[in-house]
Amino acid sequence: MNTLIETLEYLVFITFELIALFLLISAAVEIILMYIPQDKIRQWLSGRGILDNVIALVIGGAGMAMPEMTMLASIFQKKLVIMIIAVIFLTAVITGYLFNVLL
């Protein structure tokens, strides 16, 4: 019974931690977008090929993936989390590149 209580406590802790991270990252992105016009972002991300995909992934992925990576890091070993991040990163860059080339 003790492990059930500990598990529920951990679940509540992780839930509040992820909510806090999501709110902080969302607020930071909104503040940045208030000062950087979308036209400027489009200009930065046009005409560089695969480098555009990497930049877009870093800009968009840093905020969106942080809660998930925190959760994965609390569950799995760090080497596995790094491998997951690398696979997601490469898949997103390659898919974005193919999407830009084919469309």
Image (cartoon, rainbow, N blue to C red):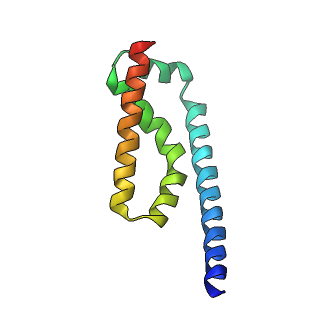
Q: How many marks?
A: 0
Up-down relation of residue 14 to residue 64 (above or below): below
| Residue 1 point in image, percent of width and height | 66, 86
Residue ID at (43%, 64%): 76
Nearer to me, 63 or 44: 63
| Residue 103 point in image, percent of width and height | 46, 12
Nearer to me, 45 or 15: 15
Residue ID at (43%, 35%): 57
Question: Extreme top residue here?
Answer: 103
Nearer to me, 9 or 48: 9
Question: Extreme front residue here?
Answer: 1
Up-down relation of residue 52 to residue 60 (above or below): above
Nearer to me, 2 or 20: 2
Drawn side of residue 64 relative to residue 47, left or right: right
| Residue 42 point in image, percent of width and height | 48, 20
Q: Is residue 46 visible?
A: no
| Residue 64 point in image, percent of width and height | 54, 43
Task: Name the image quarter holding residue 49.
Answer: top left
Residue ID at (61%, 44%): 26
Up-down relation of residue 21 to residue 14 (above or below): above
Q: Is residue 80 visible?
A: yes
Drawn side of residue 80 relative to residue 40, left or right: left
Residue ID at (36%, 43%): 87
